[in-house]
Amino acid sequence: MRIWTWLKVLMIGLLLTATGIYAVFTSDWFQKKYMYPLLYQEAVYTYALERDIDPFLIAGVIRTESKFSSQARSPKGALGLMQIMPETGRWIAEQLGEQEYRTADLTDPDINIRFGSWYLSSLKKEFGGNEVLVLAAYNGGRGNVKQWIVRYGWNEDFDDVQQIPFKETREYVEKVLYSKKKYIELYSR
């Protein structure tokens, strides 16, 4: 009889512990602090406003690209929060009239967010504001996306992420859009 009482108490204790852990894990506090932080908010909002880009899209890109690590470096050589390739950084610097640009500047959070936001804005203009195409171009290259548009007959209403032929790009777009959704849920209240 005592063992059944002990097992009941143990089960109730485990259930309460699991419920508490779940409540903490799903709380806004935990989600904002550990799962979906929004670091560099001032730069994100400033450049989002300046370039007419959704700040939560920028946050989603940063989270997906670098998890907010300004010193992130990809195996292919992309740098910083928004993982900008050195050649792309040089091109963006030229477009922005930056005379003193150095590749190492891409690890500066403010410069990286400014450059990445400008690049997202240029892709937004090029692809008619279609976020799926913008993100596919950001990850897989604008040239590839232009080819897919012609080859598959996509238009500005394209939204079927599953049709993106590159698995890495398809998964990237899904991750960014999911993160954007979570940022909206957590930070726009």
Image (cartoon, helix red, strand yellow):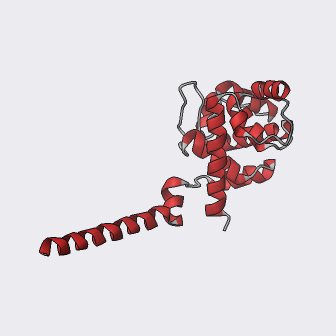
Residue 176, visible in the rendered structure: yes
Give residue 128's quadrant in the image: top right
Residue drawn 50% across and 66% down? 27
> Is 125 on the left or on the right of 37, as rendered?
right
**Image x and y of residue 112, in percent:** 65, 40
Residue drawn 45% across and 61% down? 25
Q: Where's the N terminus, which quadrant?
A: bottom left
Q: Where's the C terminus, which quadrant?
A: bottom right
Up/down of 88 relative to 28, above or below: above
- Nearer-the-camera pick, 5 or 161: 5
**Image x and y of residue 126, in percent:** 85, 35
- Nearer-the-camera pick, 134 or 96: 134
Up/down of 125 relative to 187, above or below: above
State how many labels appear: 0
> Is 13 on the left or on the right of 142, as rendered?
left
Give residue 100's quadrant in the image: top right
Residue drawn 62% across and 56% down? 182
> Is 30 on the left or on the right of 137, as rendered?
left
Residue furthest out toward the left: 2
Residue drawn 71% across and 53% down? 55
